[in-house]
Amino acid sequence: MRYKLLVVFLLPSLVFAGVNNKPKINYEALDKIPSNGLARVMGEGMAKSLPVQLDVLTRTTRVSVDENIITTFKEINTEHDSIKSVWEKSWESVKETFTRRAFKMDSQMACNDKMLNYLIVDRGVIFKYDYINKENKPLFNYTVSREDCLKVK
């Protein structure tokens, strides 16, 4: 509970630090909180704004946390006219390309965000992305970890 209160009070100022000539983010206070506690609070905060429509095909439906792994569930509308034929006829042939592109997009977004980068690179939090269809059937998944962020430019 102590960690949760500390993060609740510090997180808003840390997220907006550096905006409008405010000082850069100082993570000293967060360094005192266990990684799994930070992951839990971050995951709970992310979950409060869900579901979120990301684009015409994809929406984030839920977030869960297990120790230092934050899992984001993204639902793809496989019935949408723009991809329905691909899904029905040749999903297996395009799955690898689709997964690679989704990974690139998710890893760049996570690794280029200062707070998420801190969690991943400095604190060892892992972001897992589970892509599902509207029937909650798994389509593909992957993780974004420290090694991935170190490769992102």
Image: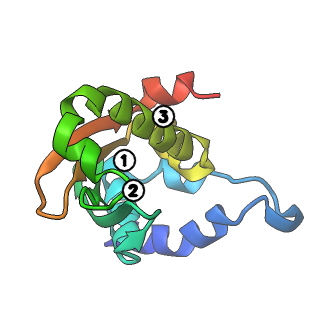
At label 3, counting other C-alpha atoms closer than 10 Å, the crowd grade (few under 14, some 14-19, many 20 or more) is few
- State the residue at coordinates (54%, 46%): 109
Q: Nearer the viewer, residue 15 or 141?
A: 141
**What residue would you read off at disc 3?**
104
Which quadrant is the N terminus positioned in? bottom left
x and y percentages locating residue 152 in the rendered image: 58, 28
Q: Amino acid at mark 3?
A: Lys
Q: CA distance from mark 3 to mark 1?
A: 25 Å
x and y percentages locating residue 53 in the rendered image: 42, 70
**What residue would you read off at disc 2?**
38
Q: Is residue 134 left or right of residue 5?
A: left
Secondary structure of the residue carrying numbered label 2: helix
Quarter of the rendering containing residue 61:
bottom left
Q: Are marks 3 and 1 in contact (CB under 8 Å)?
A: no
Which quadrant is the C terminus positioned in? top right
Q: Is residue 123 visible?
A: no
Looking at the image, residue 6 lies above or below residue 28:
below
Q: Are marks 2 and 1 in contact (CB under 8 Å)?
A: yes
- State the residue at coordinates (44%, 35%): 101
Tag nearer the camera, 3 or 2: 3
Quarter of the rendering containing residue 124:
top left
Looking at the image, residue 97 lies above or below residue 127:
above
- State the residue at coordinates (51%, 30%): 149
At label 1, counting other C-alpha atoms closer than 10 Å, the crowd grade (few under 14, some 14-19, many 20 or more) is some
Q: Amino acid at mark 1?
A: Ser
Looking at the image, residue 53 lies above or below residue 96:
below
Secondary structure of the residue carrying numbered label 3: helix
First reached walking from the N terminus: tag 3 or tag 1? 1
**What residue would you read off at disc 1?**
35
Q: Amino acid at mark 2?
A: Leu
Q: Is residue 108 left or right of residue 51?
A: right
